[in-house]
Amino acid sequence: MREIDVLLQMKAYTAVDELYTYGKHVRGTNGVGVSIGQLATTKHRNIVPEFDSFVQYYDTDTFADDVIRAAIDARDNWTESQRRIVILKATQVLVMYFAALQNAYEAVEDCKAQKSQTSKDSHSWDQTAGILIGSLEGTAKNGTSEGYMFYDLAQEHCLEFGTCTVDTTGVQLNEKLISLLYTGRGAVLSGSCRAIEKVAEELSGLLLIPIVQGALSASSELTTSEDPDKRAEAYVYGRALVPFVKQRAAASDIDSYFGNSAPSDKRHTAQKLYAALATAYPRMNVDCEDIGVSNGIDTCSGVVYVSDYIWIVVGVGIGLLLVAAGFFYYCRRRKKSIYSENNARSNPPRAEMNHSMDLLEKAFTNTRKNVTPESSNSDSDGETELLNKKYIDDRVEDFSNNLDRFQDEDDDHSYDEEAIALTKAPGPDII
């Protein structure tokens, strides 16, 4: 990249074309040279999930190569300075983005293919790290300011968006990047294929953040002034982001305000770009809060994630359940009230019922007292019989005494008949 930059400053476009097409210093696993042009056109990029969105939008899989070659051949009426910016920036954010992710996802495929082997090859993952960091960052902490890859791009905008670390020399994004690269290498060496894939997915969203920061920064500058070099930079950022924007009006705004010529109402450039990209962050797997804040503009304004929809649906569902429960309770109470009113005549009050029961119980008790039990009648009849028997016995005894006294005087047998009659027939009921 640096050698291409030197040739561009010399305006040696033929040499730039050859170096871009054939390469010079980089060799692949088979010893064959690897060029930027090959990275921009290889069919293996289709392993990256985001690649299909770009092919569908541009209707070609050579979209990055088309932008770079148009600038090399001066087909888009760019100035000399603009041609240099378009070539370098397109290589950085269009070519290297997919080249790094291609190697990351190839590491996943290598892991699955080598699952039965004891030794794991981390070559693809090491290439991912090499493409993202580059050789010019050196070994010093936080690298240098002379890089051309994503590591340098994150450093370029951290101060503006407040994403630098506390000491202002480090970058939060780069710290996450290095952490993910180490995590991915550990997953490769341990043969954890799913872990490698998860790291690759996180990388795809993380690498878009400095691109978004660059686009938003350019939109703010183009709103107040027309800088030709910033116009060329914004154009490349737009080419890298517009395929993620699925709303037609938002995508049209990016094409219009980030075109290679200034729009008629450039004062709305920042407003339109912020609004257009807000529709794309969820699809880009980008957390808007990680982008930061520039010029006091809320990056998350108008952004709606799937999780927000879920909470809205849950809230509405709970609200409907509460309303239904309240309506059911109201109907139950109303039905019970109507039932009580309709049965008021047939169901006397409880106090009145108790009073009536008391009266009935008293009346029934009195009646029982007045009625002689059967056992009492039996006892009375037995007593009466005993009294009658005693009376008869007394009469018989008296009659016998009188009979002895008058037997000699009167031999009339009427007394015997009377005695016999008295002994056979029961006496009168005296009681």
Image: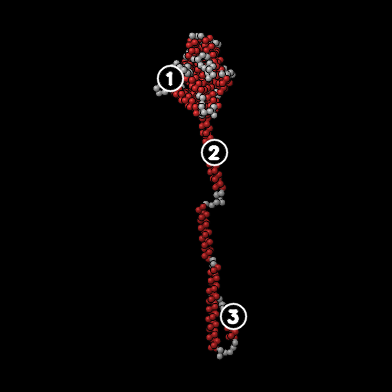
Other-residue count near label 3 (Cα within 10 Å), few / some / many at <14 / 14–19 / ≥20? few
Q: Report the front residue among 43 and 80.
A: 43
Residue in view at x 60 percent, y 87 percent: 413
For the residue marked with disc 2, what is the amino acid? Ala
Q: Residue 54's x, y, as percent?
A: 56, 20
Proximity of marks 2 and 3: CB atoms separated by less than 8 Å: no
Q: Tell me the element at label 1.
A: loop
Q: Is residue 258 above or below residue 306?
A: above
Residue in view at x 57 percent, y 89 percent: 410
Q: Which residue is mark 1?
A: 139
Q: Which mark is residue 424?
A: 3
| Number of callouts | 3
CA–CA distance in space, label 1 to label 2: 65 Å
Spot the residue most to the bottom. 408
Spot the residue most to the left. 167
Q: Nearer the viewer, mark 1 or mark 3?
A: 1
Other-residue count near label 2 (Cα within 10 Å), few / some / many at <14 / 14–19 / ≥20? few
Q: Which residue is mark 2?
A: 324
Q: Report the front residue among 132 and 402.
A: 132
Other-residue count near label 1 (Cα within 10 Å), few / some / many at <14 / 14–19 / ≥20? few
Q: Tell me the element at label 3.
A: helix
CA–CA distance in space, label 2 to label 3: 96 Å
For the residue marked with disc 1, what is the amino acid? Thr
Proximity of marks 1 and 2: CB atoms separated by less than 8 Å: no
Q: Is residue 178 above or below residue 225?
A: below
For the residue marked with disc 3, what is the amino acid? Lys
Q: Nearer the viewer, mark 1 or mark 2?
A: 1
